[in-house]
């Protein structure tokens, strides 16, 4: 997303007083650095089905929210999801 800031000059310009435009990228801290987009994530099967039918977001174990649209077999598993899944399976096996 890009935000444009328009400045007004001191004098009367023919273009309505607009003298300069500064364009800066808008960084949304919630989006992070995009590294989560390079991984496959663990998500409940029911949530994947619901997303495919209704087009809603899913939430991975690591907390990432998105609408799946890529083949997860093409990406490495998210390290955070993998660690959390290992902890879940480890606890389930110890009972």
Image (cartoon, rainbow, N blue to C red):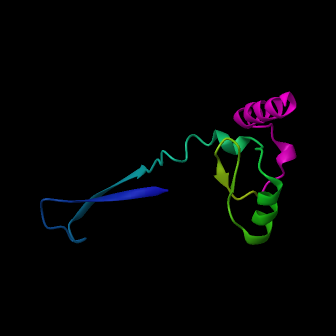
* Residue 84 at x, y percent in the picture: 73, 34
* Residue 51 at x, y percent in the picture: 75, 64
Q: Which residues are magenta?
A: 69-95
Q: Nearer the viewer, residue 61 or 12?
A: 61
Could you tell me which residue is drawn at 81 percent across and 59 percent down? 46
* Residue 18 at x, y percent in the picture: 25, 64
Could you tell me which residue is drawn at 67 percent across and 55 percent down? 66
Residue 88, quarter of the rendered image: top right
The C terminus lies in which quarter of the figure?
top right
Q: Nearer the viewer, residue 73 or 50?
A: 50
Q: Is residue 86 left or right of residue 57?
A: right
Could you tell me which residue is drawn at 50 percent across and 56 percent down? 1
Within the magenta stretch, is there residue 85? Answer: yes
> Which is the main secondary structure of the residues drawn in magenta?
helix
Could you tell me which residue is drawn at 45 percent across and 49 percent down? 25
Q: Is residue 87 left or right of residue 13?
A: right
Residue 63, quarter of the rendered image: top right
**Most extreme residue toward the front, as rendered?**
95
Up the image or down, 68 lies above or below 86; here it is: below
Q: Nearer the viewer, residue 54 or 74?
A: 54
Q: Is residue 3 left or right of residue 90?
A: left
Within the magenta stretch, is there residue 78? Answer: yes
Up the image or down, 50 lies above or below 34; here it is: below
Residue 41, quarter of the rendered image: top right
């Amino acid at each position: 997303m890009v935000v444009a800031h328009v400045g007004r000059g001191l004098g009367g310009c023919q273009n309505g007083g607009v003298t300069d435009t500064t364009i800066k990228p808008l960084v949304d801290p919630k989006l992070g650095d995009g590294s989560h987009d390079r991984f496959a994530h663990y998500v409940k099967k029911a949530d994947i089905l619901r997303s495919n039918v209704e087009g809603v977001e899913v939430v991975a174990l690591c907390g990432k929210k998105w609408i799946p649209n890529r083949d997860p077999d093409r990406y490495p598993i998210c390290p955070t999801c993998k660690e959390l899944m290992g902890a879940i399976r480890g606890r389930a096996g110890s009972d």
